[in-house]
Image (spheres, rainbow, N blue to C red):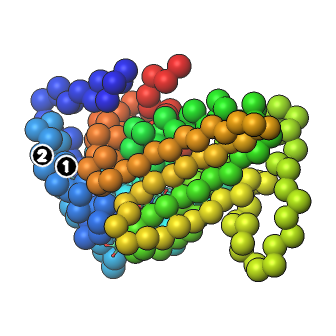
């Protein structure tokens, strides 16, 4: 990755990486990526029904979690108890669940690192950053996320993160909610509302993961768009995180925290 070399770990022994959700679309792609990295060793592959606590004492340095929103928080607490750093791509995190992990890490006191990142693709990380930069300058802002139809959750974690960031900047800049005189004749017609920002979810065969952030002012529009056409787009970010999570104790939310974005 530019500006933050995704350099292989040069230590003597390869880092052993466990994968949770290893049978899934992302988990299996992560297993292949880890196997293709000379400085990393693929360790235990866990899926539904497997015991995360049993990873303790097996030489695992880092676990990567791509499971389901209902399981991921419990997995992370079990990984902390097992003394294993965690790289988490699973969606569904809330301020409360993140706070519980922060507290657990502080109480544990061993300097473990946990990264929770809604999107590991560089284009998505930059799109979120650019959207936060633009947010203060526009009257209107809406988010459209577009994904494959097998996705279990909506809105996407990326869209939630994007909308929350836009909302925080708008509040700081003294902007209220965007102009909107519409009275919907059908529930859902204006999408979901995340901290005052409308978020629309499209599910379409053929898509992988895409997002458009629309900003409007009188007479002008800014569109920021990110497209992941293949799951390989997430792998440089995942590998970067597995190599560096141990150097970043505590909880980090978002891969931008690991990049030198300025
Ligand atoms: N952060 C990112 O860049 C990124 C990218 C793609 C997907 N995701 C997210 O990753 C998650 C997984 O996506 P996917 O497309 O791979 O889904 P998937 O349904 O293909 O895979 C999920 C896997 O988790 C397994 N699983 C369920 N409960 C489990 C548990 N308790 N312990 C271990 N394994 C369990 C399932 O059996 C399945 O194999 C979703 O939340 C998705 O939104 C994030
Ligand atoms: O395919 C998915 O599911 C994805 N989930 C993440 C999200 O919800 O933002 C990231 C993009 C792909």
Establish if 248 lies above or below 53.
above
Question: Mark 2 and mark 1 in contact (Cβ < 8 Å)?
Answer: yes
Tell me which residue sits at (74%, 53%) in the image. 197
* Disc assigned to residue 199: none
Q: Which secondary structure, mark 2?
A: loop
Q: Which secondary structure, mark 1?
A: helix
Give the tally of numbered discs: 2
Q: Quadrant of residue 61?
A: top left
The answer to whether residue 55 of the structure is visible from this angle is no
Indicate the position of residue 77 as horizontal and vertical percent values: 49, 59
The answer to whether residue 201 of the structure is visible from this angle is yes
Establish if 9 lies above or below 103.
above
* Disc assigned to residue 36: 2
Left or right, residue 102 beside residue 36: right
Q: Residue furthest front?
A: 219
Indicate the position of residue 149 as horizontal and vertical percent values: 42, 73
Tell me which residue sits at (71%, 58%) in the image. 198
**Front position in the image: 166 or 180:** 180
């Amino acid at each position: 990755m530019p500006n933050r070399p995704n350099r292989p770990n040069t230590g003597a022994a390869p880092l052993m990486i466990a994968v949770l959700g290893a049978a899934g679309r992302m988990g299996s792609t992560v297993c292949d990526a880890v196997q293709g990295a000379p400085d990393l060793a693929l360790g235990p592959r866990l899926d539904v029904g497997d015991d995360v606590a049993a990873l303790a004492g097996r030489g695992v340095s880092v676990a990567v979690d791509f499971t389901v929103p209902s399981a991921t928080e419990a997995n992370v607490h079990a990984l902390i108890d097992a003394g294993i750093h965690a790289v988490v791509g699973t969606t569904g995190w809330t301020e409360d669940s993140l706070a519980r992990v922060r507290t657990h890490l502080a109480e544990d006191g061993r300097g473990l690192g946990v990264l929770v990142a809604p999107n590991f693709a560089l284009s998505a990380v930059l799109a979120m950053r650019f959207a936060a930069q633009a947010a203060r300058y526009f009257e209107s802002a809406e988010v459209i996320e577009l994904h494959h139809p097998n996705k279990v959750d909506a809105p996407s974690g990326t869209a939630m993160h994007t909308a929350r960031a836009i909302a925080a900047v708008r509040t700081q800049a003294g902007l209220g909610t965007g102009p909107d005189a519409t009275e919907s004749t059908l529930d859902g017609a204006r999408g979901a509302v995340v901290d005052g920002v409308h978020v629309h979810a499209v599910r379409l065969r053929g898509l992988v993961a895409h997002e458009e952030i629309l900003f409007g002012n009188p007479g002008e529009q800014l569109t920021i768009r990110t497209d992941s056409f293949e799951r390989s787009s997430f792998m440089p970010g995942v590998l970067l995180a597995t190599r560096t999570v141990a150097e970043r104790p505590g909880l980090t939310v978002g891969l931008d925290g690991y990049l030198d974005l300025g």
